[in-house]
Image: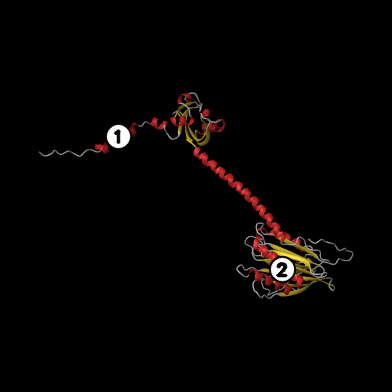
């Protein structure tokens, strides 16, 4: 006999179908109460006076309390720490009554074990159909991981602040060390030259960088005085080392042969031999010799320049002119370098001003052009010998951020002859 055919099994029949139906049945039988009790967050409902009317098992487990001990016997505020209870009474509860709901408030629960449990609390008032408040529903989220994260951030912030304080102390110490080193590259004080007013100033563009500007004034014999002012390339320890070498070379060469060309040639040889291999460096410098001039009552000046901005002579009559030294090469670049010289006489009331290019290359304002040599000549024109450096010191301060490079100043002036009945003022060189 042949087998009688059977219709296909309806959906849901068979082993797979029975498993699927069982799963749906289980979901349908899973009551909302069970979801409430075992939710990953705490739930509780309180009367309007705060008395707990309902609380889920999750929150009870966090607190270590039993339902009989809590429901109808405790208020929500009783679950909080002392500080949390105070905040609840003074801020949380009043805001909730005013707004009807409040979200994400950080509080701390007090567990049976004494542990303080950080939580985030959200509460909302449930109203009757007539608009009367009936109860308060509150959701409590465990904020221990968030608290740990915040504490770690706080520790990191404190560590960063401490590091910043230490860094600032290190920066101050570095600035103090740089200032001491910078001063060691300059004369502690200019010597007193009979019949001459001398003044100098060093303006640091940045206290965090060691500059390479330098100057000096010293006696060659009982009548002649040598002076120089210059600027080495670069900044930092390397520039300081080159500055020191340059100053001592100039002094030593001047004592051997004070002729400006001879002195600059010796310096050029020393710097080229020292820096030509691998670390080429150079400097600009003006070197000169002063000698009393009996005919004028002032001083004769013989100077040479190696690529440095020209010296400026401020005349007693009110004008100012540059002492041109064109063609002088940078010192230390070439093995053989040519240097040019110039001569002038400083008469009573005249001043010889030497400066580095930080002054003339300063910006007079945001986006403005450089200060320049013409502006410098106009600025110092008419100033007396004892007024030149103080006026320029104020000008350098006024440049502010426009001054991007250090500036050294050296002024050598002959006091003006006193008029009839006047007494010549004595001034101690600075």
Q: Quadrant of residue 384?
A: bottom right
Q: Are marks 1 and 2 in contact (CB under 8 Å)?
A: no
Query: Residue 371: x and y, percent?
Result: 68, 65
Residue 133's place in the image compared with 147, above or below, is: above
Query: Residue 137: x and y, percent?
Result: 46, 31
Q: Nearer the viewer, residue 29 or 250?
A: 250
Quadrant in which the N terminus is drawn = top left
Calculate the distance from the C-alpha at mark 1 to the C-alpha at mark 2. Answer: 101 Å
Q: Quadrant of residue 158?
A: top right
Residue farthest to the left? 1
Residue 345's place in the image compared with 166, above or below, is: below
Q: Nearer the viewer, residue 88 or 378?
A: 88
Say which residue appears at 61% left-offset and 49% top-offset. 164
Query: Residue 210: x and y, percent?
Result: 66, 60
Disc 2, SS: helix
Quadrant in which the C terminus is drawn = bottom right
In the image, 262: left or right of 140? Answer: right
The residue at which mark 2 appears reads as 249
Q: Residues within 10 Å of mark 1 (few under 14, many from 20)?
A: few
Residue 183's place in the image compared with 145, above or below, is: below
On the question of residue 351 being in view, the answer is yes
The residue at which mark 1 appears reads as 22
The way the protein has been coloured in the rendering is secondary structure
């Amino acid at each position: 006999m042949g087998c009688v055919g059977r219709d296909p099994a309806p959906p849901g029949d068979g082993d797979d179908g029975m498993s699927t139906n069982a799963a749906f049945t289980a979901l349908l039988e899973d009551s909302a109460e069970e979801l409430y009790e075992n939710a990953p967050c705490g739930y509780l409902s309180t009367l309007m006076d705060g008395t707990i009317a309902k609380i889920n098992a999750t929150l009870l487990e966090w607190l270590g309390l039993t339902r009989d001990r809590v429901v109808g016997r405790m208020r929500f505020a009783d679950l909080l720490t002392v500080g949390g209870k105070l905040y609840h009474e003074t801020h949380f509860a009043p805001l909730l009554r005013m707004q009807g709901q409040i979200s994400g408030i950080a509080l701390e629960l007090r567990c049976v074990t004494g542990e303080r449990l950080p939580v985030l609390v959200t509460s909302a008032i449930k109203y009757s159909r007539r608009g009367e408040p009936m109860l308060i529903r509150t959701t409590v989220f465990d904020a221990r991981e968030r608290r740990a994260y915040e504490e770690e951030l706080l520790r990191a912030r404190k560590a960063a602040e401490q590091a910043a304080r230490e860094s600032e102390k290190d920066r101050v110490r570095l600035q103090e060390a740089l200032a001491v080193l910078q001063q060691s590259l300059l004369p502690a004080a200019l010597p007193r030259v009979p019949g001459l007013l001398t003044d100098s100033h060093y303006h640091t563009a940045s206290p965090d960088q060691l500059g390479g500007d330098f100057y000096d004034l010293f006696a060659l014999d009982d009548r002649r005085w040598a002076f120089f002012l210059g600027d080495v390339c670069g900044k930092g320890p390397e520039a300081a080392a080159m500055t020191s070498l340059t100053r001592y070379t100039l002094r030593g060469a001047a004592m051997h042969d004070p002729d400006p060309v001879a002195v600059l040639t010796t310096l050029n040889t020393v710097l080229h031999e020292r820096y030509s291999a691998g670390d080429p460096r150079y400097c600009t410098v003006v070197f000169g010799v002063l000698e009393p001039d009996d005919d004028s009552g002032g001083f004769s000046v013989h100077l040479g320049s190696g690529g440095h901005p020209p010296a400026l002579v401020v005349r007693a009559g009110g004008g100012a002119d540059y002492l041109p030294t064109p063609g002088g090469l940078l010192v230390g670049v070439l093995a053989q370098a040519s240097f040019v010289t110039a001569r002038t006489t400083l008469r009573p009331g005249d001043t010889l001003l030497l400066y580095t290019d930080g002054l003339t290359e300063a910006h007079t304002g945001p986006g403005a052009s450089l200060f320049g040599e013409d502006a410098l000549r106009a600025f110092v024109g008419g100033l007396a010998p004892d007024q030149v450096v103080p006026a320029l010191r104020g000008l350098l301060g006024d440049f502010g951020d426009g001054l991007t490079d250090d500036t050294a100043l050296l002024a050598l002036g002959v006091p003006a002859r006193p008029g009839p009945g006047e007494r010549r003022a004595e001034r101690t060189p600075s």
